[in-house]
Image (spheres, grey):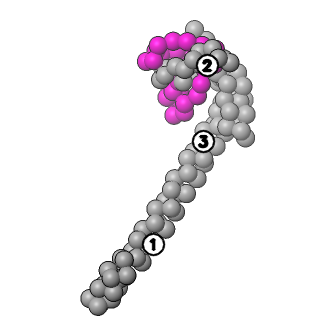
Amino acid sequence: ADAADARAREMGLPYTPREVDARAQHVTARSQRQDRLESISSRYWTMQYLAQSMRDGVDRFDAIALTRETTDENGTAVLVLLPAIGMRAWVREFDCEPGTRLRVRVHKLHAHRAFIGLIPCN
């Protein structure tokens, strides 16, 4: 690395390879932090929208089953996508094949904890 830095200085380059690597790592780390914050912010506003929808009396959504998981504590749970709000959530103590379309009702919502409890309607 020292030889490459010396060669860069001899060639009159504005940055050495070490400085370029350090800058790239800094930019990558900043980008990852920003992506994480945007993800958290997006989920926060989705939960706020959901809370307002529930206050307005809208608590049923179409869903598509993505995958299912069997656990000892809760039996089978299904991860569903709620396309209307672009969010994934688990329907506990429920079983269906991935790809199944279903209607779910929001029975519990903790917006500040980003928790949503769903139960199937059909």
Q: Is 58 one of the magenta-colored residues?
A: no
Q: Amino acid at mark 1?
A: Ala
Q: Which residue is mark 3?
A: 43
Residue 84 vs 70, above or below: the answer is below
Q: Quadrant of residue 113?
A: top right
Q: Which residue is mark 2?
A: 71
Residue at left 45%, top 72%? 22
Label 2 with label 3: CB-CB less than 8 Å: no
Which label sits in the foreground, 2 or 3?
2
Disc with the residue nearer the chain's start (1 vs 2): 1
Of circles 3 and 1, the one toward us is 1
Distance from disc 3 to disc 1, alpha carbons, whole Å, reads 32 Å
Q: Write down the region rendered in magenta.
A: 80-103
Question: Residue 118 at what x, y percent from top left?
Answer: 64, 21
Disc 2 to disc 3, C-alpha distance: 26 Å
Residue position for label 1: 22
